[in-house]
Image (spheres, grey):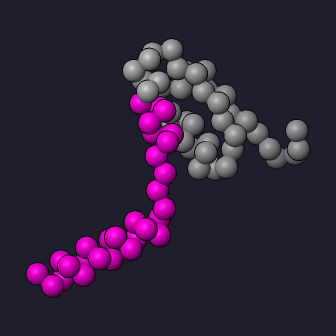
């Protein structure tokens, strides 16, 4: 393992918040959740990705439309 690298293992992953935070920091992560419904929530959250530039462009368009009302 190279110096400064890490892997997060969350044995009680719940809805995946720790895993999302690790991903955001560029850290490899693994999680286990025993409750099937909660595990599905975590899986869905981990699949969601957004591009901040696309979000800002959408907000800019909304602002322009609001100003023209």
Residue 21: where, in percent of width, then height? 56, 44
* Magenta highlight: main SS: helix
Quadrant location of the N terminus in the rendered image: top right
**Taking 33 as reference, is 57 above or below it?**
below
**Taking 8 as reference, is 14 above or below it?**
above
Residue at 20% over, 79% down: 65
Residue extending furthest toward the bottom: 68
Residue 53: where, in percent of width, then height? 47, 70
Residue at 62% over, 42% down: 22
Q: Quadrant of residue 7?
A: top right
Residue 41 vs residue 19, the one in the foreground: 41
Residue at 87% over, 45% down: 3
Position of residue 35 in the picture relative to residue 4 (left or right)? left
Number of numbered discs: 0
Q: What segment carries the magenta color?
A: 41-69
Instruction: Residue 24: say if magenta.
Output: no
Residue extending furthest toward the top: 34
Residue 2: where, in percent of width, then height? 88, 44
**Taking 11 as reference, is 29 above or below it?**
below
Residue 33: where, in percent of width, then height? 52, 20
């Amino acid at each position: 393992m190279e110096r400064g690298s890490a892997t997060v293992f969350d044995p009680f992953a719940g809805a995946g918040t720790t895993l999302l935070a690790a991903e955001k920091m560029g850290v490899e992560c693994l999680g286990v959740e025993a409750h099937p419904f909660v595990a599905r929530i975590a899986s869905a959250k981990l699949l969601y990705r957004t591009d901040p530039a696309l979000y800002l462009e959408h907000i800019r368009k909304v602002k322009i439309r609001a100003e023209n009302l």
